[in-house]
Amino acid sequence: MLSPNPLKKPCPCGSGRKARYCCLRAEALDKKNEILSMRTYQARKKITRQLIQFSKSFDLQNSLPEAWLFFSSGSAEEPSIDILPIFMPWFYYRWDARTDEDNDGEPSPYHSLAGMYLRRQGHLLDQIERQCLESGFDAPLSFFKVVDTVPGKELTVKDLLRDDDYPELRLNDISLSRCARPGAIFLGLVFQLHGVATAEGAAPLMIPPEATGEILALRKDIKEDYGDLNNEALFECEDVTLDLYWTFADRSKMLPTITNTSGEFMRLQTLYFDSDDQASVVKALVPLARDPEIISETLEQLNFAEIPDKISFKWLSSKPSKKLQGRTIYGDFTVTKDSLTVAVNSDERATRVKKEIAKRLGALVRFRMTSYLNAEKSVEIPSEPVPMNQTGQMSLSQMPEDVRKSVTAMAAAHKKKWFDTPIPMLSGQSPRDAAKTDQGRKELELLIETYTYRHEGIPDNPMASLFNPTEDEIRSELGL
């Protein structure tokens, strides 16, 4: 007796449908899509190699600089290596490669190098390869927001310059899926063919979620000017799309300015001096400690049977600061048998320390070097480095006392005022006012998404958490 056809059996998933119309069909479709995706990937790689080879037959001495000038929004800088993965595909598919002699009308993607390649050598391509090449003519630059990722495999993105009902795209991109996190936005060229989307090029900058509002404002302008958000409209507006990208790029280079209690730019540094007379150095400098008790205790150490290897004290301001409710610390002095080191937090205080030491000690000490400590790296120095947390920043407890007090006070005030401070991302409203309307609540959710994006997968940053309210604090305070 013949065994029943497994295709006609009920599906094991329990749906009640026959297997051939349920999970087996879905598996077959997945397999078909996987094969198509791999075939498309191979075709795109081949086309890219051939476009590079084809472009060598053209004199690009003028075309490339002109294209870069447009792409970079007028930058005089040479293109960096990390921008080439998006600039070169854009150049191949978008830049008008015609010379003045053969310029016979309005430019179109088919006047690009890719278009010329298609006309001259398209007969050598198979169907998939030709379709892959042609799909590039329908791919304008756009901003894509990462919705979800499977690191090392794929990511789901939403085109922010399209209408809200435009479908999300699934990109089979190994490298991009590893570096992009949900919420991040990137400028890209995404080619689509038979339901398979591929990021042909992606700019190196991962733009934070708070930029969504500016991108949606650009989308609104495009729709008002062109009446639609189709390919033609986005092609026409590539210049303003690029302008906005470079605005984000410039903004990403700007770091917040941190100052000490005197309003000076904070630059942590240590001054090193050579000296052979520990006792004379201590006697000359310890009066800067101002406190009679500290001065007495420090001088007493010079009378010990065995003088300590290190004698430390602080240079304090002559008068207490109302703001700090204490004295300002100008420098931390450490005197050994053969050296003097002074830790300060600004160039201005370093200069003041050098002048004071020269006045009090003259030829007894010799300046040797300055080492700097910043958020990116600790310069290797002879003495013990200041402990740092895993983010590469000094922890609050390791900051000079006056700076620590100032930072803590600033953080508490900032956190309290934040809920009533107008924020551009909330259309100029404060978080408290925004929470009163539906549109404001949507913008607040985007703000919270930005918070999540900034902190997810990032080592604990005590300074950030000190200044910024947490998601729970925001939702609790605003009743979200």
Image (cartoon, grey):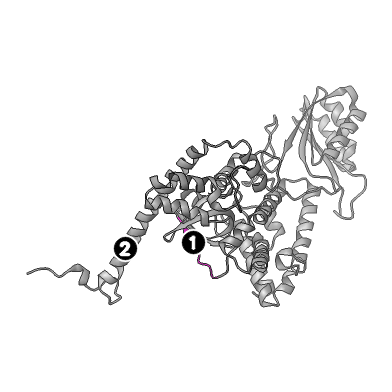
Q: Position of residue 79 (x, y in %)?
A: 63, 40
Question: How many tags in the picture?
Answer: 2
Task: Please state the horizontal and vertical placement of residue 243, each as a whole percent of the image.
Answer: 68, 53
Whether 23 is drawn above or below 74: the answer is below
Which quadrant would residue 467 be assigned to in this image?
Answer: bottom right
Q: Which residue is farthest left?
A: 1
Q: Amino acid at mark 1?
A: Leu
For label 2, the SS is: helix
Left or right of 319 in this view: 402 = left
Residue sitting at x 60%, y 60%: 234
Q: Which residue is mark 2?
A: 27
Mark sitting on residue 264: none
Residue range corresponding to the magenta coloring: 165-171
Q: Residue at x 69, y 77 (%)?
A: 437
- Residue 407 visible to the viewer: yes
Does the magenta portion include 250?
Answer: no
The image quadrant of residue 218 is: bottom right
**Gap in Å between the C-alphas at discs 2 and 1?**
20 Å
Q: Is residue 452 visible?
A: no
Badge 1 marks a residue whose secondary structure is: strand
Residue on which the image places disc 1: 169
| Residue at 87% from the left image edge and 38% from the top image edge | 296
User: Front-most of 468 and 63?
Assistant: 63
Q: State the image coordinates of residue 111 (x, y, percent, origin top left).
A: 55, 49
Within 10 Å of the Cα at label 1, are there few (<14), some (14-19), or many (20+) other Cα atoms? many
